[in-house]
Amino acid sequence: MIRRSLDVTSQDHSVRSVIMDTMDSSGLYLDVTEFAHDTPGWVQHLAEVWTELGLLLFGVLFVVAWWRARRGDPRAVAVAVLAPLGTALAYVISETAKSFVDEERPCRAVSGALKPLVECPPHGDWSFPSNHSTIAGAAAVGLALAWPRIAALTLPMAVLMAFSRVFVGVHYPHDVGVGLVLGALVAFLVVRLAARPVARITEAMRGSRTGVVRWFAGPGAAPVPARQAPYAYSRAEHPHEQTMALYRRPAQHHQPQQQPRYQPGYEPSYESQYQPSYRPEEPDPRP
């Protein structure tokens, strides 16, 4: 039993060594870190800040994308909600892969490497794949699907974050490359596969009696008011009248006034109808 477990362990170690030999990018890592040490101090400090600040910025964009999607159709809300969920799933997959590969950090494993710009992670915090790059790739693709106009912003952000992990000296180039692809693929599949059922849930939430549930799903798009028909004028009108008719308001349709009802007891006489109301003055009989 012990011998069998040793054989399995040796096979796993050989598989990992083959993977590491295939994706060996230590030479490129040395070139990038040497370039990093030759850059000005403010560039190095900016890379140190960006490698963590970028994650916070992605989180803010997730909230903004969800808020603006609340006034859209249910599918827009579904995609905006699935974007961070797909990013979280990509992180879980990346963290699980780390426990199978067990790749040591280049700041500790590469001989002749310069001191990293940030503190080298402790032993056991494995290098492959890069969690930061995985999160960045998933967030960039998820936000691009939820808010296509900011794709030109989120995709370069993800690439810069991945490069910053090599720049500060804590990851191999192949760590960040695989992390970007892994995160982007997971986010894309989550959105494509779950958008329709989540959209149905969102539509049901908008009809819920609970205020918090309706607030989260959003009010949806506002109804478009019906347009009033333009004023139609007759062709028989004078050309000047036709021109002026464009500036007229449509005629208001008033209900005809009701005629007074017939009052019994009042019958107009023949004289009041046909005799004129004017009568000549009669001469005064007095002398």
Image (tube, grey):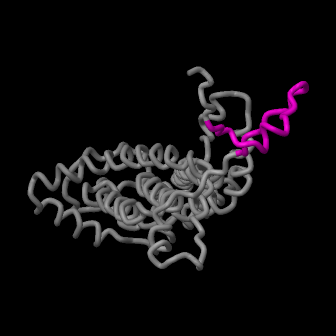
The C terminus is located in which quarter? top right
Q: Is residue 82 left or right of residue 175?
A: right
The residue at 54%/61% (across/down) is: 13
Q: Position of residue 263 (x, y in %)?
A: 86, 28
Magenta segment boundaries in residue numbering: 255-280
Q: Nearer the viewer, residue 228 or 211?
A: 228
Specify whether residue 277 is painted magenta: yes
The residue at 14%/59% (across/down) is: 37
The residue at 47%/43% (across/down) is: 63
Q: Is residue 92 left or right of residue 64?
A: right
Q: Is residue 172 visible?
A: no
Q: Position of residue 61 (x, y in %)?
A: 42, 48
The residue at 46%/75% (across/down) is: 22
Q: Is residue 151 visible?
A: yes
Specify whether residue 107 is painted magenta: no
* Magenta segment, prevailing SS (helix, strand or loop): loop
Quarter of the view holding residue 33: bottom left
- Check the image and report above or below for 83 versus 60: below
Q: Which residue, as the protein is rendered here, is positioned at the far top?
A: 286
- Check the image and report above or below for 179 versus 70: below
Q: Is residue 36 left or right of residue 270?
A: left
Q: Nearer the viewer, residue 141 or 161?
A: 141
Q: Nearer the viewer, residue 74 or 53?
A: 74
Q: Nearer the viewer, residue 202 or 46?
A: 202
Q: Which residue, as the protein is rendered here, is positioned at the far front?
A: 287
